[in-house]
Image (cartoon, grey):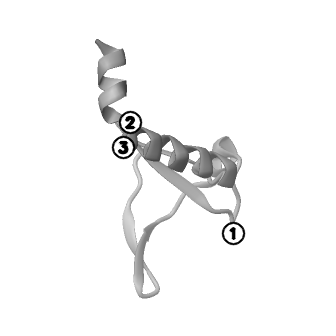
Amino acid sequence: MKLKVTKVGDSTGIILPKELLEKLHISQGDTLYITETPRGFELSVYDEEFVKQMDIAESVMLEDSNVLRKLAE
């Protein structure tokens, strides 16, 4: 789906078509979460519990990077 970047007030944004909003199960006022993936970016509904879990996972990966590297061998 092709989306155009446009001016929204003093900001820049994209307009999500109704069909996309329905597929994502989002509506006006919802908070979204964007994740970078190897294939691009993934847009999903913001889930506070998921964000907490990802923050914990990132800190573990940073703190224990040597251990994780050894386990990956």
Question: Camera-side residue: 15 or 67?
Answer: 67
Give the residue at mark 1: 29
Distance in Å between CA atoms under marks 3 and 2: 6 Å
The image shows residue 11 at horizontal and vertical percentages of 41, 81
Residue located at (63% from left, 54% from top): 46
The vertical placement of 46 against 68, above or below, is below
Label for residue 62? 3
Residue found 71% across the figure and 47% down from its top: 25
Mark 3 vs 1, N-terminal side: 1
Apparent side of residue 18 relative to residue 3 in the rendered image (left or right): right
Q: Which residue is mark 2?
A: 64
Mark 2 residue element: loop
Q: Residues under labels 3 and 1: Cα distance? A: 34 Å
Q: Quadrant of residue 5?
A: bottom left
SS at mark 1 in the image: loop
Is residue 20 among what the camera can see?
Answer: no
- Dots 3, 2 in contact, CB < 8 A: yes
